[in-house]
Image (tube, helix red, strand yellow):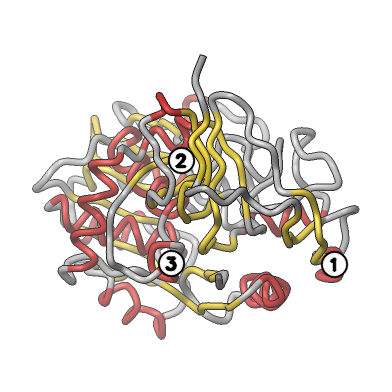
Amino acid sequence: MSQPTAAGDAAAPATMRAVVVTRPGGLEALEIKDVPVPVRKPGWVRIRVKAFGVNESEVTTRKGESDAEVSYPRVPGIEGVGVVDEADEDSGLWPGQQVATMMGGMGRAYDGAYAQYVTVPAAQAIPFETSLPWDVVGALPEMFQTAYGSLTRGLALKAGQTLLIRGGTSTVGLSAATIAKDLGATVLSTTRSESRSGELRAAGVDHPLVDSGTLADQVRELVPDGVDAALELVGCSVLPDTLRTVRQHGTVCFTGALAGQWTIPDFSPFMIPGGVRLTSYGGEAADLPADVFAHQLQAIAAGRLNVPVAKVYHGLEQVRDAQADLESGATPGKHVVVLGD
């Protein structure tokens, strides 16, 4: 039987501070409470949270618009970074080790990272070593996992290929651009406003495009035969047009719906151009292997990858501000909350 290892000889405190949504509502539904420190189950790891990103999914949970997986009261937070507090001896994890975690039901089916401690399945903890500050690392897990998984598992993107990112100024879009450039691809990426083209160029985008709702003609002017791959982040409202930007035997990966439309009424398979492949991505922590995450951290430290951080907030008291700023959409990039000691 596995024996637990804890952080030093000191036991974790009995209680912790956490943001709790007791019932759906506005920003006032994000209440800071003293709650019991979660008890770690066998096969799980307890993490002392150092930072976490704030995501649309958590806004949806707060508003009560999530699916039936979410019940209340709930501590939100689908991602976080921190250090191991307690783990099974045979887990390969040890106290004080830096780890990242995301998805897998955290903040939805069970309590998430808007807290001083969180417990997750050990397989969902990605170990890493870096001297980068917590506010930078805290921006990465969900954003990089989604972007990397979409480009690799979804699109199998290779060096020398052309990639279209539709929804390019989103956090996943900006991350996908930097990762795709690191992989050696030529990147076309969209914004709805000409004034934001500079953000795309800063992420390494070769061809910023202003998206008016129809894009195929613009793309075909640059790449007459069509791009090799397209990452769809805007949603089903523009998916038929995105499909027309891709060459025969190229692939479109549907990952997000920033415009809110997840389905196509009266869908017909014949809307897909002949020879074009359509897939989707909605992966988990396992889609961001530890060695890939380590490579990305090294690339950030070397200045080869940019981290699109919108604003850093300090303490659980600023979670409401972070969600409000995220909803406003005024500042592009990731909103990150850092917890002090």
In the displayed structure, 69 sits above or below 118; it is above
Q: Position of residue 30 (x, y in %)?
A: 80, 65
The residue depicted at 80 percent of the width and 54 percent of the height is: 35
Alpha-carbon span between mark 2 and mark 1 = 30 Å
For mark 2, what is the residue?
Answer: 254
For mark 3, what is the residue?
Answer: 211
The three-letter code of the residue at mark 3 reads Asp
Of callouts 2 and 1, which one flags the residue occurring earlier in the amino acid sequence? Answer: 1
* Numbered tag placed on residue 232 in the rendering: none
Q: Position of residue 297 (x, y in %)?
A: 26, 58
The residue depicted at 44 percent of the width and 71 percent of the height is: 135
In the displayed structure, 30 sits above or below 166; it is below
Alpha-carbon span between mark 2 and mark 3 = 17 Å
The three-letter code of the residue at mark 2 reads Phe
Q: Are marks 1 and 3 in contact (CB under 8 Å)?
A: no
Position of the C terminus, as image quadrant, is: bottom right
The residue depicted at 18 percent of the width and 45 percent of the height is: 225
For mark 1, what is the residue?
Answer: 26
**Foreground mark, 1 or 3?**
1
Taking the image as shown, residue 61 lies to the left or right of residue 226, namely right
Mark 1: secondary structure: loop
The residue depicted at 33 percent of the width and 55 percent of the height is: 176
**Foreground mark, 2 or 1?**
1
The one of 159 and 143 positioned closer to us in this rendering: 143
**Foreground mark, 2 or 3?**
2
